[in-house]
Image (cartoon, grey):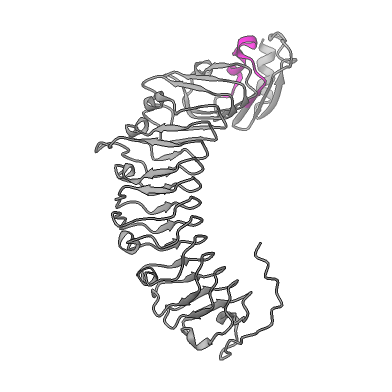
């Protein structure tokens, strides 16, 4: 045994041991592998019930990451790797058939990651104040484990690519350090959340719910999250958006890649929202009261909808702090905008059916993207001299220019020649 310890000491920074070297471990089939490199160790094809846990005693004290790959057990108790050490450790279980994980209170694990497992159940003992980060991906979980509410120190949780259909958000409400929740790419149909108490979701800032199967969403449930900054609901199947949304902290709201036809914002109050994305929906008209609901929006992305011409565009185009407006891939036939916000820096009009373009008033440095339209006549004088560049590729007439690259005093020149490819596929 002393010779065995000497072997580990000589190869402290990079060594590999298999069952053929661990002579005290009987062989029950394929040998497990033990590899340590710098501050990380990996054990592959380890069967705790057959090969024991003494190999863990040889993990260096300054190891910060332990990876268990192809772990050969259906139930794994994290107490197996609970040895005395000053600092916590991150444990990753990957590509394993483990179905149940039990995590006791006295564990040293501060980060836990389970990826590509058969996990269907995980239990956290009450009073766990060590685990800060939890990631579960590609599992067979059908619900968020109820004992997650025992993780008093949890700061970030990610549960994705699993079979979860319903989420009880109340499980997270009392976790006072939790600031980041990612429940993307599951099969969620419903979101359960009762009216939050004053102290619930005390630190939650980021909530990601994209890539699920929601068809209806009630925005009122998010009003009880006092510090929420990012709400991501993109890439669902949402057709109906109901309820009020009132938040003085929300900065980013993403509803893109859904199936929304009508969006009413008159009961919303988002004074500090800077980025609103409703791209790739089925909107036939602008969201009502949008300029009142989010007066300080900076980036407004409404591309890939079915929006048409109308007088309601004025309230959007004149938003005081608006810097980027994307209304490409809609059904506009005219872009005659007599007044634009002086802060607007990018106006994207590409891939519409626009035949007329006129922007006589604009802030300094405005860039207009108007390619892939039907503009056949154009007067350069209809543009404000503050427009710094114009892209008109793939129109019957092309008057594209970039003042930064033009010689001083040179004026833009229009061309009817269509040389470049206009394939939009």
- Total labels drawn: 0
Task: Find residue 178 and report its horizontal and vertical position in percent.
Answer: 38, 36
Task: Find residue 123 and report its horizontal and vertical position in percent.
Answer: 45, 20
Question: In the rendered view, would you say 42 is above or below 250?
Answer: above
Asked if residue 414 lies left or right of residue 194, the reply is right
Question: In the rendered view, would you say 25 is above or below 100?
Answer: above
Q: Residue furthest left?
A: 198
Task: Find residue 199 and report its horizontal and vertical position in percent.
Answer: 26, 37
Magenta stretch encompasses residue 43: yes
Question: In the rendered view, would you say 19 is above or below 270?
Answer: above
Magenta stretch encompasses residue 91: no
Asked if residue 70 lies left or right of residue 76, the reply is right
Asked if residue 333 lies left or right of residue 272, the reply is right
Q: Quadrant of the C terminus?
A: bottom right
Q: Which residues are magenta?
A: 42-60
| Residue at screen point 29% across, 55% down | 269
Closer-to-camera residue (22/146):
146
Question: In the rendered view, would you say 270 is above or below 183?
Answer: below
Quadrant of res 418: bottom right
| Residue at screen point 57% across, 32% down | 138
| Residue at screen point 32% across, 32% down | 174
Task: Find residue 421 and report its horizontal and vertical position in percent.
Answer: 70, 71
Asked if residue 147 lies left or right of residue 423, the reply is left
Q: Residue furthest bottom?
A: 409
Q: Quadrant of the N terminus?
A: top right
Closer-to-camera residue (109/339):
339
| Residue at screen point 32% across, 61% down | 289
């Amino acid at each position: 045994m002393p010779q065995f310890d000497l072997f580990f000491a000589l190869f402290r920074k990079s060594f590999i041991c298999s069952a053929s070297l661990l002579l005290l471990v009987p062989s029950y089939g394929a040998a497990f592998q033990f590899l340590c490199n710098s501050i990380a160790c990996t054990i592959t094809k380890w069967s705790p019930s057959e090969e024991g846990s003494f190999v863990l005693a040889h993990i260096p004290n300054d190891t910060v990451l332990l990876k268990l790959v192809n772990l050969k057990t259906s139930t794994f108790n994290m107490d197996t790797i609970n040895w005395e050490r000053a600092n916590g450790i991150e444990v990753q279980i990957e590509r394993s058939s483990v179905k149940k994980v039990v995590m006791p209170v006295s564990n040293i694990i501060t980060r836990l990651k389970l990826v590509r497992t058969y996990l269907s159940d995980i239990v956290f003992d009450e009073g766990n104040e060590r685990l800060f980060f939890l990631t579960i991906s590609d599992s067979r979980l059908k619900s968020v484990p109820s004992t997650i509410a025992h993780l008093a120190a949890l700061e970030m949780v990610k549960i994705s690519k699993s079979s979860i259909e319903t989420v009880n958000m109340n499980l997270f409400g009392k976790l006072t350090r939790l600031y980041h929740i990612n429940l993307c790419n599951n099969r969620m149909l419903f979101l359960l959340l009762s009216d939050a108490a004053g102290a619930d979701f005390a630190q939650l800032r980021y909530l990601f719910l994209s890539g699920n199967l929601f068809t209806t969403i009630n925005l009122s449930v998010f009003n009880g999250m006092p510090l929420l900054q990012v709400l991501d609901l993109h890439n669902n199947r949402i057709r109906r958006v109901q309820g009020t949304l009132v938040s003085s902290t929300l900065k980013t709201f993403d509803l893109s890649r859904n199936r929304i036809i009508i969006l009413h914002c008159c009961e919303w109050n988002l004074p500090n929202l800077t980025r609103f994305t409703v791209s790739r929906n089925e909107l036939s008209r602008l969201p009502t009261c949008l300029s009142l609901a989010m007066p300080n929006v900076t980036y407004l992305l409404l591309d890939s909808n079915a929006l048409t011409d109308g007088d309601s565009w004025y309230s959007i185009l004149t938003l005081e702090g608006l810097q980027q407006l994307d209304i490409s891939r809609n059904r506009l036939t005219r872009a005659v905008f007599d007044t634009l916000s002086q802060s607007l820096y990018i106006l994207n009009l590409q891939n519409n059916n626009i035949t007329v373009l006129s922007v006589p008033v604009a802030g300094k440095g405005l860039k207009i993207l108007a390619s892939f339209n039907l503009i056949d006549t154009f007067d350069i004088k209809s543009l404000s001299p503050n427009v710094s560049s114009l892209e008109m590729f793939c129109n019957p007439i092309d008057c594209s220019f970039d003042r930064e690259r033009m010689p001083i005093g040179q004026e833009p020149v229009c061309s009817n020649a269509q040389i470049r490819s206009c394939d939009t596929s």
